[in-house]
Amino acid sequence: MDSVTEAGGMPQSIVRGLSAGKATIMAGILTGVLCLDIFTKSLVQRNMLVYEQRDIIGEYVRLTYIFNTGAAFGIQLGPYSREIFLVLSLVALIALALMFYYTPVEDKLRLASISLICAGAIGNLIDRVRSENGVVDFLDVGIGTMRWPVFNVADMAVTAGAIVLALSLWKEEQRDGG
């Protein structure tokens, strides 16, 4: 049997890319993050008015219900921000899918980080498709007027995943002598 094929005649790269272990990681993280993201956004939308604020831990942590038509931190690209960010999200998801496919099943940390980024991107993409108002954001942290931009569960998943992915890639580069 040729060394590039597995039992059943499939190339090793395809078997590596489609392993059950990788699918389990992706499915578990996607399901968990998307369920939590959709649930929390729905809860806010059912129980708050747009622009309403509720203190959770004094002024440090509060709920502030807003819509974000732009990207992270309210970045806007003019009147077509929604459409542009829809397309950019889809392109990013395709790139992440390819990265996931080529990541070995043994690199669970990288697979988890890619899955977190995908889950967050999909969570916000759902909002962009569902409503012209934009993405539902509601988590508001800071002190007085010094506040972090309002965010949501999907944003936390993207941020955490991106940090872990960057560390994973940096660690690999250090290990490979780069």
Image (cartoon, rainbow, N blue to C red):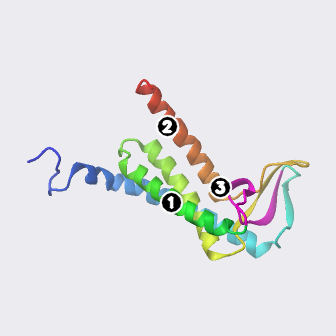
Residues at marks 3 and 1, CA–CA distance in whole angstroms: 18 Å
Q: Which residue is mark 2?
A: 168
Residue type pointed to by label 2: Ser
Q: Which residue is mark 3?
A: 155
Residue in the picture at 60% in, 53% down = 157
Q: Name the element at disc 2.
A: helix
Residue in the picture at 11% in, 46% down = 2
Q: Name the element at disc 1.
A: helix
- Looking at the picture, tell me which residue is in the foreground, 168 or 82: 82
Tag shown at residue 129: none
Residues at marks 2 and 3, CA–CA distance in whole angstroms: 20 Å
Residue type pointed to by label 1: Val
Q: Is residue 80 visible?
A: yes
Q: Name the element at disc 3.
A: helix
Residue count near mark 1 (Cα–Cα under 10 Å), binned few <14, some 14–19, many ≥20:
few
Q: Are marks 2 and 1 in contact (CB under 8 Å)?
A: no
Q: Is residue 144 left or right of residue 113?
A: right
Q: Magenta stretch: give its range.
A: 61-78
Residue in the picture at 65% in, 58% down = 153
Q: Is residue 12 left or right of residue 79?
A: left
Q: Is residue 35 visible?
A: no
Based on the picture, tell me whether residue 76 belongs to the magenta stretch. Answer: yes
